[in-house]
Image (cartoon, rainbow, N blue to C red):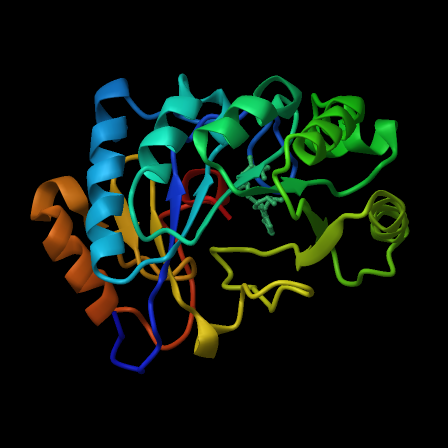
Amino acid sequence: MYDRYNRKIDYLRISVTDRCNLRCTYCMPEEGIQLLRHEDILTFDEIRDFTQIAVAHGVTKVRITGGEPLVRKEITTLIRMIADIDGIRDLSMTTNGVLLKHFAYELSTAGLHRVNISLDTIDPEKFNKITRTGNVQDVFDGIRAAKEAGLLPVKINCVIKASKDEAEAAEVTSFCKDNGLEVRYIRQMDLVKGHFSMVDGGSGGDCAMCNRLRLTASGKLKPCLFNNIEFDIREIGFENALKMAVELKPACGSKNETGSFYNIGG
Ligand code: SAM
């Protein structure tokens, strides 16, 4: 699929839940969020069917995200259903890693290729402060389990304020060097104010090269993270939503006043 700016659209990011087991200060309010109703959340069959159509139209790269994807019940079943679709060359997941030690092996067996794990600091106290509830040791255990399960390369997503030379990020950098992990530095963004920039070490944030579509847990297909445009796949049909999202993908991000990282997937 090519959009009107001749960008090849071959990457689908799927948020499978709006729920999360952490409350990162830059992502979610401390008291949590108004959760989606069960019936508003796409079923596994709907996610598989939509993905199948997207792949038939040229998507080769699929990422599962959230909320926290590992809190969605039976997530391994969904991974298996998606892995069974012919034509996906890269099937990955973005996770906070907290539950990964329990899932890494079965995810790998189900057909997941690799994981990105979010880690902004290796300091236990700072980690607990940023995530409001988390224990960094769980993430370390998750990283080890992912490596052992062959979910490679394991990449680390590190949110920074302004620079990768900040103390926390520098510690994450040496941790990654010591543990054979790739690291991507993501500047803290603001959807409403339209503050975003290119991801250092990754491909996000570069509008001219953007190849992505994003499906939210409630079935809204978004052609751009920094834009309010979205198409409800249940309302207008899977094929039609795909067509519209590609056709109307904006040249460049601006602002998003309707969504949040936790329901679009970052
Ligand atoms: N729960 C999973 C996780 O923690 O990786 C997946 C969802 S999370 C929303 C996806 C990514 O978005 C994480 O790497 C997170 O750090 C990032 N993120 C969330 N809010 C952000 C913000 N305001 N600016 C930049 N990145 C953000």
Locate residue 235, reporting x and y percent. Answer: 10, 42
Position of residue 206 in the picture relative to residue 57 (left or right): right
Locate residue 175, reporting x and y percent. Answer: 87, 44
- Look at the image and tell me whether residue 31 can be seen: no
Q: Tell which of 78 and 235 is nearer to you.
A: 78
Marker count (numbered): 0
Position of residue 154 in the picture relative to residue 180 (left or right): left
Q: Looking at the image, is 250 positioned above or below residue 183? A: below
| Residue 227, picture quadrant | bottom left
* Quadrant hosting ligand 1: top right
Residue at image coords 81%, 60%: 164
Residue at image coords 82%, 47%: 176
- Look at the image and tell me whether residue 3 can be seen: yes
Q: Looking at the image, is 36 positioned above or below residue 13? A: above
Q: Residue furthest bottom?
A: 5
Q: Tell which of 37 and 113 is nearer to you.
A: 113
Q: Looking at the image, is 30 positioned above or below residue 247? A: above
Position of residue 222 in the picture relative to residue 206 (left or right): left
Quadrant of the image for the N terminus? bottom left
Residue at image coords 86%, 27%: 125
Locate residue 131, reporting x and y percent. Answer: 69, 30
Locate residue 253, reporting x and y percent. Answer: 43, 69
